[in-house]
């Protein structure tokens, strides 16, 4: 019976940051909880959630180079009125166009689904199917600097609702797609057999940035002199295949992180099929494969095919990621500590 108002502050959105606020007429936030709001397992109210909502919001904002904070709040009175909470958050970005509507429109949930979600879903379906409206994605990636704090990674694993895919053998087209990145050259002076190539395959830029930042923090914590290469960031299995094949042919070490469902960017192959191709067809033994689908059942399938680790979504806290990956790299003889 309350309301939620999302506001974009165009006057404040300068210097490569976009500012938003979200205000709801809920029960408000107890002062004792305000310092812990963005940690995991913090839930309030009569209907308790998982405690992951605000922690996930914090993680996503930081992955986009921004932040989130509680701007203002008041608790409900004895009659259950006048409670509210207002959050302000910012992400890196620029305003490129301003459209001024004739009047402000307040949408009901039903209207929102009809007027906002339905057109977006139809456009996504046309894109995924290669329809007339399809064009290769050209979004820029923003990689925020590494943080000294572990708070943003203090997120417990949360399974998604995906159904396990069909894991039967598939015929794979190995020809490079149009959007594929340039593959590394075996003759470049910067590369050696001591290099570690990080390959990230996910259709979400936010998730890509989360993984990338964790990897760079892990590299900073290593005592090895190996060079880590971060050129292998892709949105589909198809676009990643030429790159993975090339680093395999040059016998490079690789850490490959794969999502399962990549159809939002036009991907046809799933992460399961990608792992099967890497393990069974390429025989890539000098690689660590990490399942990042967020689905426990799919993660189990990935492990059975040869993946080394499962990372849930939201991701485990950094210390767990660090310890698990270090252990595997040490077993492979990649690192010294």
Image (cartoon, grey):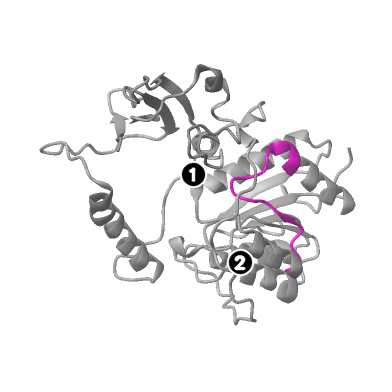
- Residue 306: say if magenta: yes
Structural distance between the alpha carbons of marks 1 and 2:
21 Å
Q: Which residue is mark 1?
A: 141
Viewed as shown, does residue 206 lie left or right of 118? right
Left or right, residue 306 beside residue 33: right
Residue at 73% from the left image edge and 43% from the top image edge: 321
Q: Is residue 56 above or below residue 248?
A: above
Residue 317 image-quadrant placement:
top right
Secondary structure found at label 1? loop
Q: Quadrant of the N terminus?
A: top left
Percent of width and height locating residue 233: 57, 53
Name of the residue lying farthest toward the left:
102
Q: Nearer the viewer, residue 192 or 29?
A: 29
Quadrant of residue 124 within the rendered picture: bottom left
Which of the two residues, 4 or 145, is positioned nearer the viewer here?
Answer: 4
Confirm whether the magenta stretch covers residue 213: no
| Image x and y of residue 191, in percent | 73, 50
For disc 2, the neighbor class at 10 Å (few under 14, some 14 to 19, many from 20) is many
Q: Badge 2 is on which residue?
A: 242
Residue at 48% from the left image edge and 62% from the top image edge: 179
The structure residue drawn at horizontal position 53% and vertical position 60%, both measured from the top left corner, is: 161
Image coordinates for residue 13, horizontal then vertical, percent: 34, 27
Task: Pick whichever, 9 or 39, lies toward us.
Answer: 39
Question: Relative to 282, is 233 on the left or the right?
Answer: left
Left or right of 221 on screen, residue 131: left
Q: Which residues are magenta?
A: 305-321
Marker count (numbered):
2
Question: Which numbered dot is residue 98?
Answer: none
Which of labels 1 and 2 is toward the front? 1
Q: Secondary structure at mark 2?
A: helix
- Image quadrant occupied by the C terminus: top right
* Residue 64 image offset from top left, x and y in percent: 49, 37
């Amino acid at each position: 019976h309350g309301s939620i108002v999302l506001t974009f502050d165009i006057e404040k959105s300068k210097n490569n940051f976009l500012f938003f606020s979200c205000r709801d007429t809920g029960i408000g936030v107890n002062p004792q909880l305000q310092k812990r709001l963005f940690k995991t397992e913090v839930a309030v109210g009569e209907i308790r959630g998982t405690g992951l909502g605000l922690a996930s919001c914090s993680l996503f904002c930081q992955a986009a180079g921004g932040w989130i904070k509680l701007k203002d709040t008041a608790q409900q009175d004895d009659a259950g009125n006048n409670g509210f909470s207002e959050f302000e958050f910012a992400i890196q970005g620029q305003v490129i166009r301003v459209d001024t509507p004739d009047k402000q429109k307040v949408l009901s949930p039903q209207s929102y689904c009809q007027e906002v979600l339905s057109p977006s879903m139809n456009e996504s379906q046309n894109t995924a199917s290669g329809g007339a409206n399809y064009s290769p994605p050209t979004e820029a990636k923003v990689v925020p600097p590494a943080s000294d704090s572990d708070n943003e990674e203090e997120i417990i694993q949360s399974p998604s609702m995906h159904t396990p895919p069909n894991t039967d053998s598939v015929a794979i087209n190995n020809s490079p797609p149009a959007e594929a990145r340039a593959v590394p050259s075996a003759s470049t002076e910067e590369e050696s057999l001591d290099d570690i190539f990080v390959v990230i395959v996910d259709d979400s830029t936010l998730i890509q940035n989360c993984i990338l930042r964790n990897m760079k923090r892990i590299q900073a914590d290593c005592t090895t002199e190996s060079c880590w290469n971060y050129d292998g960031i892709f949105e589909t299995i198809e676009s990643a295949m030429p790159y993975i094949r090339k680093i395999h042919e040059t016998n490079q070490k690789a850490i490959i992180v794969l999502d399962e469902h990549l159809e939002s960017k036009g991907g046809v192959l799933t992460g399961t099929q990608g792992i099967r191709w890497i393990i069974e067809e390429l025989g890539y033994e000098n690689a660590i494969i990490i399942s990042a689908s967020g689905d426990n059942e799919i993660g189990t399938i990935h492990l059975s095919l040869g993946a080394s680790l499962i990372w849930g979504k939201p991701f485990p806290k950094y210390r767990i990621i660090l310890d698990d990956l270090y252990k595997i790299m040490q077993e492979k003889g990649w690192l010294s500590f």
